Image (cartoon, rainbow, N blue to C red):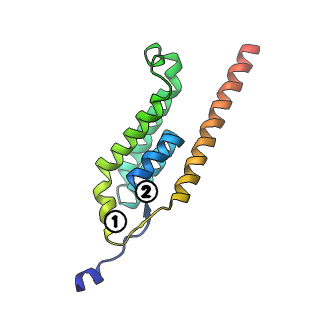
């Protein structure tokens, strides 16, 4: 009983694997990368946070290049969010789940659904702005 009282409550908040999976599906790769990287930072794995961003940048560039790669063009568009949401959920379970559970068991906090929704919406707006920029650049190049 005394041992439990002496244990420190972990600092910081974490995202659950379910939150990461859902937010990544709707908000895209940048949202999933952000949430995974933030978890790694809170859980003391800063190097894995950096690796997460490198992988996410590679995947994001690959997604942008999809229309230019004929083989990938045959994949239905709805498959992409499913694939990267499943991948983000898998990464959270595989590399963070035990540490997240321990964090929570020791009294550590979890981010609210409201914050997850806000981050997801920000991700949607970032992707929309990026796509609009590509559209306008492409239109200007074709017109000029």
Q: Find disc 1 in the rendering and name its residue.
A: 103
> Distance between the Cα atoms at labels 2 and 1?
11 Å
Q: Find disc 2 in the rendering and name its residue.
A: 15
- Within 10 angstroms of label 1, few (less than 14), some, or many (20 or more) residues? many
Can you see residue 56? yes
Q: Quadrant of residue 82?
A: top left
- Within 10 angstroms of label 2, few (less than 14), some, or many (20 or more) residues? many
Q: Residue 127 at what x, y percent from top left?
A: 59, 37
State the residue at coordinates (46%, 30%): 80
Q: How many marks?
A: 2
Can you see residue 144? no
Quarter in which the C terminus is drawn: top right
- Helix, strand or loop at disc 2? loop
* First in sequence: mark 2 vs mark 1: 2
Residue 5 vertical position relative to residue 62 in the rendered view, above or below: below
State the residue at coordinates (74%, 20%): 140
Q: Is residue 115 left or right of residue 102?
A: right
Q: Residue 114 at what x, y percent from top left?
A: 55, 59
Quarter in which the N terminus is drawn: bottom left
Q: Is residue 126 left or right of residue 62?
A: right
Of residues 20 and 68, the one drawn nearer to the viewer in this rendering: 20
Q: Quadrant of residue 84?
A: top left
Q: Residue 9 at what x, y percent from top left?
A: 36, 74
- Helix, strand or loop at disc 1? helix
Residue 133 vertical position relative to residue 23 in the rendered view, above or below: above
Q: Residue furthest bottom?
A: 2
Q: Residue furthest right?
A: 144
Q: Is residue 111 left or right of residue 122?
A: left
Q: Residue 130 at what x, y percent from top left?
A: 63, 34
């Amino acid at each position: 009983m005394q041992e439990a009282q002496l244990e420190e409550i972990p600092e910081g908040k974490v995202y659950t694997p379910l939150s990461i999976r859902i937010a990544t599906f709707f908000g895209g790769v940048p949202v999933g990368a952000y949430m995974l990287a933030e978890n790694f930072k809170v859980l003391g794995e800063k190097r894995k946070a950096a690796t997460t961003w490198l992988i996410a940048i590679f995947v994001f560039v690959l997604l942008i290049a999809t229309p230019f790669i004929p083989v990938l063009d045959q994949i239905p568009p709805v498959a992409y969010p499913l694939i990267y949401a499943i991948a983000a959920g898998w990464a959270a379970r595989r590399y963070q789940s035990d540490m997240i559970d321990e964090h929570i068991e020791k009294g550590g906090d979890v981010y609210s659904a409201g914050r997850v929704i806000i981050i997801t919406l920000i991700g949607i707006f970032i992707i929309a702005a990026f796509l609009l920029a590509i559209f306008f650049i492409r239109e200007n190049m074709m017109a000029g």
